Image: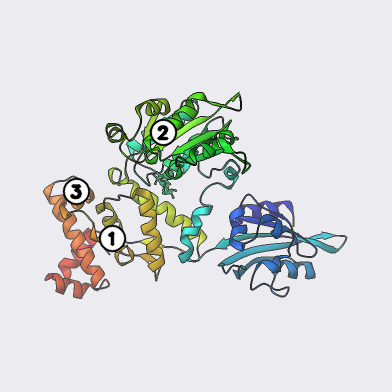
Amino acid sequence: MDLQQFAQALNEFDNVLITDDKGCAIFYDLADLNILMEIGLTPDEFFHSTVTNNYQNLSPETSTVFKVLQTGQPILYYEQQLTTLNGFSYLSLSSTYPIMEQGKSVGAIEFSKHFYESKQIKYLDNFLGHKLYRDNHTTYRLEDFITTNADMKEQLDKARRSAKKNAPILLTGETGTGKDIIAQGIHNESERYTKPFITLNCSILTEDNIFPQLYGSENEEKCGKLQEANGGTLLIDHLNLLDASLQAKLLHAVDINMLNGESLDIRYITTVNEDVDKLLVEKRLREDLFYRLNVLQIDLPPLRMRKEDIPAILDFYIQFYNEHTVQKNVSYRDEVLQLFYAYHWPGNVRELKNALESAYNNLTGNEIRVEHVPERIKKNIQQPAHLLMQVSQSGHLRDLTEAYERLIIAEKLRETDGRLAETARRLGISRQLLKYKCLKYELL
Ligand SMILES: Nc1ncnc2c1ncn2[C@@H]1O[C@H](COP(=O)(O)OP(=O)(O)OP(=O)(O)O)[C@@H](O)[C@H]1O
Ligand SMILES: [Mg+2]
């Protein structure tokens, strides 16, 4: 294989495996531990076993690595359904080359890419971020945040500017609005990006474990979050779920900023997913701690306030799934988008992703239709008038009426599987008039 082929293979595929002459792994792109989790092996186990031992359905006769080692000939663009020891199955596309020394194959190099079933969509989340950032416990950059909304873009700019400073940041936003992406993105945009990004999950802190969590525990030989985050960023996640009495202890730790007689160098990012004013009034958030942690504040608007982001987010994820699942060219019907515009998304982008995932699970062809959308969403859409306000251009009565007419026709067409004559009969209009309206509303 020449250099050019090598570079091309690196671009085309996701994974690189190098084996010795016995088919034993000697190099694997371990930036991606997810693949090993898939196989169900620890890195140590993986490097001591031959490739055929890692899959239920791989033998020396069917293994590309073994065949290449035997014949000394490359096998290019080979497709194979693989089932790992713990029963995980996926389609693998690979190109395998022998490594030759004096006319003998002394090893093999295999480039591969995996395609998953649509049932496995959730699992793909592990591959969304950037492998290289996994070393500092992050996967996101600020660029990964999808938005076309002006208010949100302003908040993103603020995040980008704040990243360079060292001041504590408070991130507010309802559940599922993307606070994790922003927090990690800030870390990776700051000068601390080579240092760890550590999360302190406030929802699990109790009177008994708050000190060990912060400072570590000697008898368990575990170091605390403060030490782990030293030099980097500590994400104080879901502060609103921390009992007010424990907030005093957290404040103390942040104020002292010392560990074992040495001062700490930590950038604090705090998230809350409830209204800050309400938390303060109800005394669920201590004012002193709030002022300590909130020097810069970034507020993520809920998805219902930026519904124009819905198609951008759907398109991004569908394209990603199209590239990584066996189900190619998936698209969605316009009515699905209209339905999504009409819904209020209390779980924000997380809920939108879940809706997409369940649509994939119910999918038969490659078009997402209203019938694939979870019932909960269909049952809870807003009043038609609200819905139409979102869909129509101007809010003028004529536009609203037309938008409504369009929805009715689209729905009837769906019921009749797109049969014009039947749709016209059900709507009590002529076929010609229906055709005219379908063309006008781009429904055909
Ligand atoms: N703007 C966005 N673009 C792409 N993906 C997004 C966006 N916002 C959120 N997501 C995705 O939605 C899911 C939820 O986001 P995230 O975990 O950041 O929410 P959160 O604000 O931290 O919520 P919580 O308060 O429940 O912790 C994640 O899978 C994330 O990747
Ligand atoms: Mg979060």
The amino acid type of the residue labelled 2 equals Gln
Tell me which corner region of the image, top left, top right, bottom left or bottom right, holds residue 132.
Answer: top right
Q: Nearer the viewer, mark 1 or mark 3?
A: 1
Q: Nearer the viewer, residue 102 or 295?
A: 295
Residue at point 67%, 63% (across, down):
95
- For residue 378, above or below residue 295: below
Q: Quadrant of the C terminus?
A: bottom left
Tag 3 secondary structure: helix
**Mark 1 and 2 residues: CB-CB less than 8 Å, in contact?**
no
For mark 1, give the secondary structure.
helix
Q: Earlier in the sequence, mark 1 or mark 3?
A: 1
At 48% from the left edge and 38% from the top edge, which residue is drawn? 210
Amino acid type, mark 1? Arg
Tell me if mark 3 has few (under 14), some (14-19) or many (20+) residues whose alpha carbon lies within 10 angstroms of its own: some
Q: Position of residue 35 (x, y in %)?
A: 60, 58
Q: Which residue is mark 1?
A: 376
| Disc 3 from disc 2: Cα separation | 44 Å
Asked if residue 327 shows in the view, the reply is: no
Cβ atoms under marks 3 and 2 closer than 8 Å: no
Q: CA distance from mark 1 to mark 3?
A: 22 Å
| Image label count | 3
Is residue 152 visible in the rendered image? The answer is yes
Q: On the image, numbered disc 3 is attached to which residue?
A: 389
Residue 402 falls left or right of residue 290: left
Q: Looking at the image, do the residues carrying marks 1 and 3 touch, with CB atoms under 8 Å apart?
A: no
